[in-house]
Image (cartoon, rainbow, N blue to C red):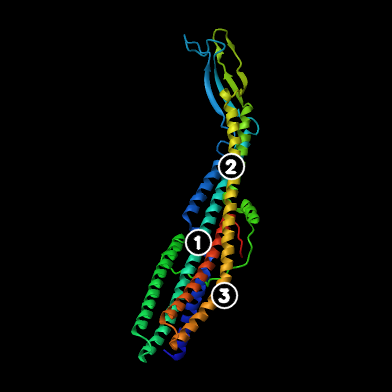
Amino acid sequence: MSKIKTKTLLFLIIFLLFGGVVSAQEADSLPALIKKAVEINPKIRTLEAKLNMAREDIPIGTNLPDPVFSVGLLNVPVNTFSFRQEAMTGTALNLTQTIPFPGSLKAKAEVKAMDTLIVKQEIADLKNQIAQQMATLYYSLQEKRREMELSKESVDLLKQVSLVAKRKFEVGTASLENIIQVEVQITRVKDQIEALKGDAQSMQAQMNAYLLRDDRVVIATPEIVPVSHEVFVTDTLLKLAALNRPALKGIKLYQNKAVLQQKEVEKNYYPNFKVGLQYTFRSYNQASGINYPDFLGLVVGITIPLGYGGNIKAQVNKTRYLQDYYGQQFHSSLQILQQSFGKINAKITELRNREKLLEKTMLPQTIQAYQAAMADYQVNKIDFVNVIKAEDDILKIKTELAKLRTNYAIQVAQLEYLTGSKLIY
């Protein structure tokens, strides 16, 4: 193979690998993962089947009932069973149609139509839950991976410390115990890395379970971003939740359904109608020698809505209490949300203040302390333990900074779940 062909092949391989990495990164963005998890979620497919059932249920019982056709024999003499003996003997054809009071069928259809809207909110609420759960796992995975990176950086620093300790040991200014101490610390940090790997693999497996794929598929996560400075006002969050959260909209729909149910049962105070048409065929009468004409009859019936035992009134009262029940449930949910919003806002404020303190003050101080400790240790001014402690302080501060930033993202995701609204773009 010529050199040109070899270079071309290598270029294609690198291009394909690079393109594959870019595609994987795009596919592993949180919105893309949530979208895919929603698309293939079996519970959502179940609710969509439930929605289809609710739609098909609307025509059932909300249209005119089928007419009834019947055939009867009238005034047949039992001594001869002859159709020509008596003038009143005949064969009757009956057609009867029941007609509910005007508006009754429409009221029933409106009640059933509410079920489709309620199921739609159930689907939206499940999608909202999936988004929140995926976001929590995603940001937690970010945190564990960042902790692993920091721990690996800590191992590199400790190895540098180990080199210093070994040099000092060679010239007789450090003890063997110093070298052992740093090796023990390196082993301890490596053990932490393995534990973090297990946690990260567990979170990745959970996310892959939402995506219905092998739990070993790698999910790429970006760098952790700093805490943003958006202000979330509780009153505004409550308004957003009342307007957009599917669970609350579902409660409101149940309340509206109860209003329509009241209108439906109030139709029972009014009568229903029944219209019947009868055509009677008569035969030639032998006794009189007359061929009698056929009969045509029309019957109109009406129900008498007495409502024995307060049956109708009880149904109406039940729908009124149902309206009150869902109304109170809605306000109770808002009260619980207000408490949750207050708690989350307090946590967000704490995280924002702590991030500023850690990033601007404590982290620079710990880095300076480590540098000073290394310098002092090299000239035998301080004990080796101080160097180990200074290095460990850097790891703790950076780890805490990563934790509070991912915790902030999780808190915002929780707010978005509770309000059913996108708060940060």
The amino acid on which the numbered mark 3 sits, given as a three-letter code, is: Thr
Quadrant housing the N terminus: bottom left
User: Cα distance, mark 1 to mark 2?
Assistant: 30 Å
The one nearer the camera, 83 or 61, is 61
Q: Residue at x 44, y 73 (%)?
A: 148
Mark 3 crowd level (few <14, some 14–19, many ≥20, 10 Å Cα) = few
Q: Residue at x 65, y 53 (%)?
A: 239
The one nearer the camera, 69 or 40, is 40
The amino acid on which the numbered mark 2 sits, given as a three-letter code, is: Tyr
**Which residue is labeled 3 in the image?**
361
Give the number of the mark in front: 3 or 2. Answer: 3
- Which of the two labelled residues, at mark 1 and mark 2, occupies the earlier sequence position? 1
The amino acid on which the numbered mark 1 sits, given as a three-letter code, is: Met
The one nearer the camera, 6 or 227, is 227
Looking at the picture, how far across and down is residue 181, in whole percent? 37, 79
**Which residue is labeled 2 in the image?**
326
Looking at the picture, how far across and down is residue 226, in whole percent? 57, 71
Looking at the picture, how far across and down is residue 14, in whole percent? 47, 81
| 41 on left or right of 302 | left
**Which residue is labeled 1 in the image?**
134
User: Cα distance, mark 3 to mark 2?
Assistant: 51 Å
Q: Residue at x 58, y 75 (%)?
A: 360
Tags 1 and 3 touching, CB below 8 Å: no
Tags 3 and 2 touching, CB below 8 Å: no
Quadrant housing the C terminus: bottom right
- Compared to residue 234, the image places residue 80 above or below, namely above
